Image (cartoon, helix red, strand yellow):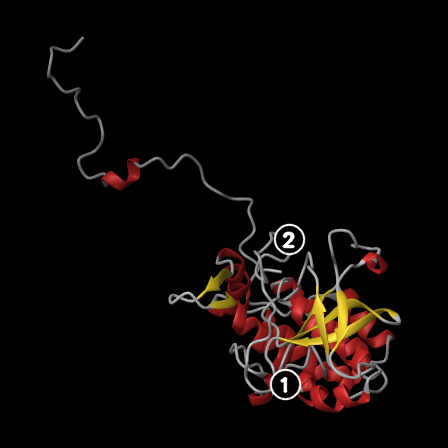
Amino acid sequence: MMNNGEAMKDTRSESTSATQWWAETHAVENMPPPLVDYNLLTSDVALKEAIARSGAQWAETELNEFGQNAGTQESIALGFQANEHRPEFFSHSPDGARIDEIRYHPAYHRLMQVSIENGLHSSHWTDPGPGAQVARAAKCYMQTQIEAGHGCPITMTSAAIPALRRQQNLFEQWAPKIMARTYEPENRSYTGKNGVTIGMAMTEKQGGSDVRSNSTIAHPVGQGGPGEAHELVGHKYFVSAPMSDAFLVLAQSAGGLSCFLLPRWHPDGGRNAMQIQRLKDKMGNVSNGG
């Protein structure tokens, strides 16, 4: 027993550093190091075999470079950052004006820039040929391993091209900017941009998979008809990639359910009357805010 206030004799060596006695409970010996600084193409045997089997060998050099860049520690960190810092929704400006703006972390914008500059949204349209779709898909497959959410606007921008080809006047106006390898995320009219992205607004609460149950109505402005202006009145449940420059929107017209191209801004620079209510948490899509 010790008397009150009497310290037990310290049996440690006088020369022992105090840090040696911190709460280090064990040595970690069986955990692999973080998977960084590797080539996503050359390390994936199945992917390489699929590229060769599908006639995209001509893109091997380009895909190898993309896979090397995607696997760097810097690129992988962008994916974590884009998901840790979720987009924020601002319905109004400080002076009370309605703006319906969603602001993203710089990491998200950097991922979008990399994908668009490498043609993940358009290379198969601008340079068609044997294996073009496969080469593009291989890049998407590798990039999705870094971050999946920004793949939503990339994929939708790509998918807008076949739809717009059904309406030649809109295709000629929009397609060059959609297929351009230029990322311009600023919230302003598409008329002053060299590159744009496209989102989609299809789903409604009463018409999810059954899109023919959609209740959004398209009212013709003027003569109406294909390629002409309409006013859309309704409520969508999901608007994927809500800061896109334009959206493919389903609505009921005189001839039944039809697809419309809805820009965020009017050609004269005025903001279109598209209002966002809130952001939703969607599994695998946190960074995108759809």
Q: Depth check: give the residue in front, 104 or 9.
A: 104
Q: Which residue: 78% across, 67% down?
A: 251
Which marked residue is nearer to the observer: mark 2 or mark 1? 2
Q: Depth check: give the residue in front, 76 or 151.
A: 151
Residue 181, which numbered label?
A: 1
271 sits left or right of 177 in the view: left
Q: Earlier in the sequence, mark 2 or mark 1?
A: 1
User: Badge 2 is on which residue?
Assistant: 282
Q: Extreme right residue here? A: 255
Q: Extreme top residue here? A: 1
Q: Depth check: give the residue in front, 19 or 165.
A: 165
Amino acid of disc 2: Lys
The count of marks equals: 2
- Confirm whether residue 139 shows in the render: no
Q: Which residue: 82% across, 55% down?
A: 209
Q: Quadrant of residue 150?
A: bottom right
Q: Position of residue 90 (x, y in %)?
A: 48, 62
Looking at the rendered structure, the secondary structure element under dot 1 is loop
Q: Position of residue 16 (x, y in %)?
A: 23, 38
- Confirm whether residue 238 shows in the render: yes
16 sits left or right of 149 in the view: left
**Location of the N terminus (image quadrant):** top left
Q: Quadrant of residue 133?
A: bottom right
Q: Position of residue 234 (x, y in %)?
A: 70, 62
How would you rate the neighbour count of disc 1 (Cα within 10 Å): few for under 14, some for 14-19, many for 20 or more?
many
Instruction: Check contact, mark 2 vs mark 1: CB within 8 A.
Output: no
Amino acid of disc 1: Arg
